[in-house]
Image (cartoon, coloured by chain):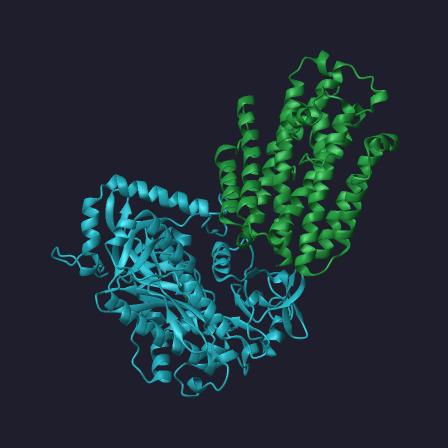
Chain colours: A cyan, B green
């Protein structure tokens, strides 16, 4: 594995320009003061109730995501490049989805193999030929980005279903501004607080034709026991929209209504944080109690917009991921600005053979997994784990992809033994409305708090940082 | 607003009110039982505490006899008793979480902090009487803080009114239950034969609805059972009296009716109960029987809860 790119220090002792002021400030600030602020931040998080649930963890159903008080800083120039790349990527994702559920030019051109689509459980035949308002499928995308050197941004995952984490982006900033006003005064940090406004504008812009001039938007949550429930309530509050559960909605004459104290009220746009499978028991899982019976027929009748659309999983599927550079080129005729991690598709015998030979150096992921569950990190795994995984791979090669172990970039982070570099990634949030695509400068930086660890997922002991884009 | 949101706000207020009431009941019972038996007689006060909390039946499924130790545990910390103080706070927090968008940050902070303290400090219950006193104070202060922050920070719209409905319905129920359990010591003037024993029963009743001082201010008299009944039933200056609760319930329901542009069975039913209270006097009530009067009231009050639920909350 190559040496990780250090976002603060240039080998040889100099600092990267974006971090110079922070370094000066760190020198002036005694370590106790940092520790004190860290505790204060934790207290704030607990009081506000910014918690998440870890499934299968009986000990405590609500946990805090550790927050690291050292900000992660990027220059305006770096951001400008990243922003351009993200917009390009999301445009391609939307065009791909529109094509897959309509003309399928890309399959005919044999850029993507048919069976990857049609044998894929996240492909939704119900969406074939269905018109979605304004042809937008992915209204909210959370694209996971990592860096391995000064020049390249690499996409790790395109989250095009119900990406979460944006509340942390916003709350981390609030808490940092409360705890470190002085540090902010010494930087020009691009604000993130307009995200809720942008999101609401995007959601209203994609209302169906049958909606009134002032469309009603609601956020559909699986409920208080969902791991991201805090975020759902936080966003509904910031957007000023109702936070609804499936049982609050009812479909009548192919229109969706919510039950209010004044009777039924029509809903036009649903920002849904419920997975496809649970949306409508009449169409998908019949045992789902989180969904709304009849929602899909209202959707087909064009009376409701779902954001994100149903069936977007086919675009962020890990098996499709490896084709993304070709997908970008196919629809846009442009070179992809953001790179892909080189990926071996275990479904292809040649790739599988290579992967089986090099398991101890690779990261192997389940095609349909997420949240860092069920993956093998070769260099960190024991021999027994690798062998067990080898069997799994042989049994069901099409269920896996493999990638080289990336040396994720590092940022200075508070640890028990003082500041030390820790690996980070970044999830910016890309919003697509009927007319424009916007990205609030920043995103959620996740940090692997254990020394040497590359797993940044909150469910696996990762933490978060505030992400600063300098406005130069 | 969403029916579910209104329902959560309504129950949130009820749980907080109930927790406070339980804390007061335990407090008052502790005082009476600390007295020598010659002052209070042989009645089992812990049994009455269970009755006023409305959990006697479920209690005896778990315990043989009612004594200080197990009643306090059952009312305060038990996880099997669905309306123990602990479970009220847990339920209040769960309700708060589902309606965070309708709560002000002050209200959320009160409930969330109480829940955090419940887990951090009180997860094993209270080991000494001093500890218990601290716990009971903590519960009462949580309720005061919650009520105060709702009053001071909420917009005066349906969210506020539904939350107040829950508060006053629960409060009316609680006051009525004390009266129901203790009606035998509340006798009219002419029949009054009670000795010194009853004095502590009376003060205990007043204490559990935090009205002992109020009594003296209103009547400027030593404790008289018929005046206590008058204070708790008919005196609308006492916030925990049935009359006061119904004045508020009618007002809140009217505000909802005006905002929504229509009245319904809930408004009519509440007004009916209020009118009956307004046109009653203690003589009539004693003649009719305090016990019967209270039982009827409890049934009417819970009927209002059902009507409100049907009209707005589902």
Say left or right for A437 vs A75. right
From the top left corner, tell me how far across and down residue A416 is, in percent: 28, 42
Q: Quadrant of the N terminus of chain B?
A: bottom right
* Residue at the extreme right of the image, as rendered: B287
Between B32 and B61, which is closer to the camera in this rendering?
B32
From the top left corner, tell me how far across and down residue A454 is, in percent: 31, 56
Say left or right for A31 vs A98. left
- Residue at figure coordinates x 72%, y 52% from the top left: B308
- Residue at figure coordinates x 57%, y 77% from the top left: A126
From the top left corner, tell me how far across and down residue A330 is, in percent: 36, 84
Above/below status of B73 relative to A366: above
From the top left corner, tell me how far across and down residue A115 is, in percent: 47, 79
Residue A23 seen in render = yes
- Residue at figure coordinates x 62%, y 59% from the top left: B2
Residue A374 seen in render = no
Between A69 and A100, which is closer to the camera in this rendering?
A69
Q: Quadrant of residue B55?
A: top right
How many numbered badges does the structure rendering display? 0
Between A245 and B187, which is closer to the camera in this rendering?
B187
* Residue at the extreme left of the image, as rendered: A12
- Residue at figure coordinates x 28%, y 57% from the top left: A72
Say left or right for B119 vs A11. right
Q: Quadrant of the C terminus of chain B?
A: bottom right
């Amino acid at each position: 594995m190559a040496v990780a790119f250090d976002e603060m220090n240039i080998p040889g002792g100099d600092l990267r320009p974006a971090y110079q002021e922070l370094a000066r400030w760190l020198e002036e600030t005694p370590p106790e003061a940092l520790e004190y602020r860290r505790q204060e931040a934790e207290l704030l998080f607990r009081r506000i109730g910014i918690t998440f649930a870890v499934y299968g963890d009986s000990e405590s159903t609500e946990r805090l995501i550790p927050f690291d008080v050292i900000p992660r800083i990027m220059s305006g120039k770096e951001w400008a490049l990243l922003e351009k790349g993200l917009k390009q990527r999301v445009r391609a994702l939307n065009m791909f989805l529109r094509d897959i559920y309509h003309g399928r030019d890309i399959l005919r051109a044999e850029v993507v193999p048919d069976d990857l689509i049609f044998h894929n459980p996240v492909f939704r035949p119900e969406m074939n030929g269905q018109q979605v308002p304004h042809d937008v499928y992915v209204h909210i995308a959370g694209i996971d980005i990592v860096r391995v050197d000064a020049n390249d941004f690499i996409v790790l995952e395109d989250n095009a279903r119900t990406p979460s984490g944006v509340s942390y982006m916003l709350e981390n900033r609030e808490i940092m501004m409360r705890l470190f006003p002085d540090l902010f005064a010494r930087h020009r940090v691009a604000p993130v607080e307009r995200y809720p406004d942008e999101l609401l504008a995007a959601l209203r812009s994609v209302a169906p034709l049958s909606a009134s001039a002032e469309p009603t938007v609601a956020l559909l949550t699986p409920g208080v026991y969902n791991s991201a429930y805090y975020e759902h309530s936080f966003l509904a509050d910031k957007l000023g929209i109702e936070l609804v559960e499936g049982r609050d909605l009812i479909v009548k004459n192919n229109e969706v209504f919510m039950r209010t104290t004044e009777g039924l009220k029509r809903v036009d746009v649903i920002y849904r944080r419920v997975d496809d499978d649970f949306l409508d028991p009449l169409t998908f899982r019949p045992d789902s109690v989180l969904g709304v019976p009849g929602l899909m027929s209202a959707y087909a009748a064009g009376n409701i917009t779902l954001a994100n659309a149903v069936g977007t999983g086919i675009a962020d599927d890990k098996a499709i991921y490896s084709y993304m550079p070709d997908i970008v080129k196919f629809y846009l005729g442009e070179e992809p600005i953001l790179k892909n991690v080189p990926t071996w598709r275990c479904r292809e015998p040649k790739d599988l053979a290579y992967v089986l030979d090099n398991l101890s150096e690779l990261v192997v992921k389940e095609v349909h997994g997420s949240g860092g569950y069920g993956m093998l990190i070769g260099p960190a795994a024991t021999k027994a784990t690798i062998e067990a995984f080898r069997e799994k791979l042989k049994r069901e090669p099409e269920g896996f992809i493999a990638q080289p172990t990336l040396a994720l970039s590092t940022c200075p982070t508070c640890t028990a033994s003082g500041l030390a570099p820790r690996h980070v990634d970044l999830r910016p949030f890309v919003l697509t409305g009927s007319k424009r695509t916007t990205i609030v400068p920043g995103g959620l930086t996740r940090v692997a708090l254990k020394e040497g660890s590359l797993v940044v997922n909150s469910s696996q002991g990762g933490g978060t940082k505030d992400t600063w884009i300098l406005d130069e | 607003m969403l029916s579910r949101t209104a329902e959560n706000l309504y129950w949130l207020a009820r749980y907080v009110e109930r927790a406070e009431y339980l804390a007061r009941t335990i407090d008052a019972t502790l005082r009476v039982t600390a007295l020598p038996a010659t002052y209070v007689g042989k009645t089992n006060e812990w049994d009455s505490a269970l009755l006023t909390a409305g959990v006697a039946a479920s209690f005896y499924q778990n315990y043989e006899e009612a004594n200080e130790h197990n009643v306090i545990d059952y009312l305060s910390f038990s996880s099997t008793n669905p309306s123990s103080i602990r479970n009220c706070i847990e339920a209040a927090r769960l309700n708060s979480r589902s309606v965070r968008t309708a709560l002000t940050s002050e209200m959320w902070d009160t409930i969330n902090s109480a829940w955090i303290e419940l887990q951090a400090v009180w997860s094993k219950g209270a080991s000494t009487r001093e500890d218990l006193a601290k716990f009971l104070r903590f519960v009462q202060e949580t309720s005061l803080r919650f009520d105060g922050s709702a009053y001071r920070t909420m917009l005066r719209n349906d969210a506020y009114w539904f939350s107040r409905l829950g508060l006053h319905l629960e409060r009316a129920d609680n006051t009525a239950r004390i009266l129901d359990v203790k009606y035998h010591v509340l006798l009219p003037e002419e029949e009054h034969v009670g000795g010194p024993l009853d004095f502590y029963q009376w003060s205990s009743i007043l204490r559990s609805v935090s009205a002992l001082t109020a009594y003296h201010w209103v009547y400027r008299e030593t404790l008289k059972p018929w005046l206590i009944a008058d204070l708790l039933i008919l005196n609308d200056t006492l916030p925990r009296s049935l009359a006061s609760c119904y004045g508020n319930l009618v007002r809140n329901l009217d505000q909802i009716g005006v905002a929504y542009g229509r009245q319904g069975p809930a408004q009519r039913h509440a007004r009916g109960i209020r009118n009956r209270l307004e046109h009653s006097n203690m003589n009539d009530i004693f003649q009719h029987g305090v016990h019967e009067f209270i039982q009827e009231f409890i049934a009417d009050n819970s009927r209002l809860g059902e009507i409100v639920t049907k009209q707005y909350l589902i």
